[in-house]
Amino acid sequence: MIEYSMKNLTADELGFKMNHIKAEPNTRFEIKPFFSRRIQGVNESPLIHIVTLECKIESTETDPKPFDLHVRLVGVFEVKNIQNDEDRRIFAINATETMFPYLRAAITNLTADALIPPIVLPVVSGGTLFPEDRGPSSYTINFDPKTVN
C-alpha cells in the first residue's frame, strides 16, 4: 500500500489581468476553468514527487472573458511503496485531492482581491477532476522518474 505525505506547497504563479471588453449591460460570460496536472520524480531522491496543479481562465477572440486568471501550485510529496501504474494512479488522485482545496482558495482570494465577485469553485473529489482518473482502464500519466522540476 502506498504511503504519501505533502512536505511543501508553494504558489508558483498567481496571475490576474482585467480584460477591458465592451459588453452590453447584463451580459453573462461563461467562465470555464481549464485544469492541468503534472507529476514528476526527482533523480536524487526516488521517494520525492513534484506535483504541479494549475488552473487557467483565458479570454480569446471567439470566447471573450472579462479577465484572465492563472494559478499554479507546486506540491512536494514524499511517496513510499509505489509498485505499479495503479499505485501511480492512486497517488495522482490523492495528491490532487490534497492540493485542490488550496487551489480553490487561491482562486477565490485572487478574484476577491481584484475587487470582482469572487470565483468559488465547487468542491470536487480528486478522482473526478481529471478524466483519466475516473476509471482504471483509461488511466494515463506522464510520469518520468528521471525528470527533475
Image (spheres, helix red, strand yellow):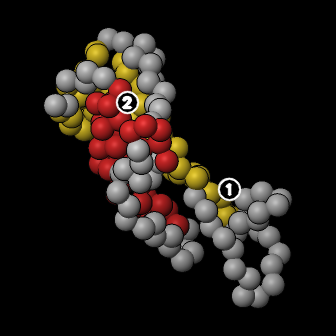
Regarding residue 111, the answer to whether it shows in the image is yes
The residue under the point 41% across, 44% down is 135
Position in image of residue 62 (x %, y %): 82, 61
Kind of residue sitting beneath label 1: Glu
Which x, y percent locates residue 95?
32, 42
- Residue 104, compared with residue 21, is above or below; it is above
Q: Please provide percent x and percent y for residue 101.
A: 34, 57
* C-alpha distance separating marks 1 and 2: 25 Å
Lower sequence index among marks 1 and 2: 2
What residue appears at the point 51 percent right and 70 percent down from the top-left corner?
119
Residue position marked by numbered label 2 in the rendering: 50
Give the percent coordinates (x, y) of residue 44: 32, 11
Q: Secondary structure at mark 2?
A: strand
Q: Which quadrant is home to the C terminus?
A: top left
Quadrant of res 40: top left
Residue toward you, 84 or 43:
84
Horizontally, residue 131 falls left or right of residue 135, namely right
Crowd class of label 2 (few under 14; some 14 to 19; many from 20; radius 10 Å) = many
Where 6 falls versus 47 (above or below)? below
Q: Nearer the viewer, residue 6 or 83?
A: 83
Residue that badge 1 annotates: 58
Residue drawn at x 72%, y 88% is: 26
Q: Residues within 10 Å of mark 1 (few under 14, many from 20)?
A: many
Quadrant of the rendered image containing residue 124 = bottom left
Instruction: Name the secondary structure under disc 1.
Output: loop
Which of the labelled discs sits on residue 31, or is there none? none
Q: Residue at x 49, y 27 (%)?
A: 142
Residue 72 can be seen in this image: no
Amino acid type indicated by mark 2: Ile
Using residue 41 as the reference point, say whether residue 7 is left or right of it.
left
